[in-house]
Amino acid sequence: MHTEHPELRLTYAQLGARLAISPDAARMLARRRAWQRIAPNRRGAPVVVVVSAEALEGEQWRTEPIDLTPNAGGNTADTGANTVEERAELAEQRAEQAERRADEANARADAALALSDRMGALLADVGSTIERLRADLSGAREGADVLRTTIDELKAGQALMLDMHARELTEARAAATETRERLQRVQDAAEALRRAEEARKARGRWARLRAAWLGQ
């Protein structure tokens, strides 16, 4: 009867703890065995290795920790890299480090491209805003020209009305002056008639007094 071996999901640190090796050695082992690796969606989260329990049991021959981190002299720590497998693991580690540096460089390039795209979009938005502002400014200038023309027309109409009112006022003043002069002439004529009447009456009274005197 066939029994399925369950799959385990382990980080490099957990895998290294199971096999008594370092996390870097666990990373290289997973790469060499072509075990499935799941990259995290969240930045900074650990990579997860999917490995069957059977495959993990096949690696349990490791009884001593193997740290393949190179020291300042270029040799591996504690092991001396005497076996072919250890030298292969060291080369794999260096390749892994080079790949990580390449991935980091690609990530920086992708970030730079994304930033460039965002800057391009921002510049496009700024250009569109400038064009809208130019259009608004052009419309405002046209409106200002129309308003200026209307004001000039109103001023011209006001000046014409003031001129007409001034002429009408001058004519009214002239008519009033002529009316006063006519009234004055009528008053003078009436005064002359009144004086002539008084003189006539005075002469009549004088004549009657003289006649009465002579008849006496």
Image: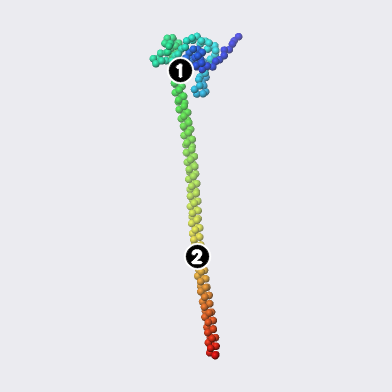
> Could one spot residue 163 in this view of the protein?
yes
How much space separates mark 2 and mark 1, taking CA atoms? 111 Å
Tell me the tag on residue 180: none
Q: Residue furthest left?
A: 73
Residue at 48% x, 13% y: name it. 21
Of 166 and 64, which appears nearest the observer?
64
Please name the amino acid that badge 1 sits on.
Glu
Residue at 51% x, 64% y: name it. 172
Badge 1 element: helix
- Callout 1: few (<14), some (14-19), or many (20+) C-alpha neighbours within 10 Å? some
Residue at 48% x, 52% y: name it. 152
- What is the quadrant of the N terminus in the image? top right
> Could one spot residue 28 in this view of the protein?
no
Please determine whether, in this image, residue 89 is positioned above or below residue 41.
above
- From the viewer's perspective, tell me whether residue 4 is left or right of residue 146: right
Residue at 52% x, 16% y: name it. 10
Q: Position of residue 165 (x, y in %)?
A: 50, 60
Please name the amino acid that badge 2 sits on.
Arg
> Which residue carries the number 2 mark?
173
Q: Position of residue 150 (x, y in %)?
A: 50, 51
- Callout 2: few (<14), some (14-19), or many (20+) C-alpha neighbours within 10 Å? few
Please determine whether, in this image, residue 39 is positioned above or below residue 20.
below
Q: Position of residue 52 (x, y in %)?
A: 54, 13
> Which residue carries the number 1 mark?
96
Please determine whether, in this image, residue 172 is positioned above or below residue 185.
above
Q: Are marks 2 and 1 in contact (CB under 8 Å)?
A: no
Q: Position of residue 29 (x, y in %)?
A: 48, 14
Badge 2 element: helix
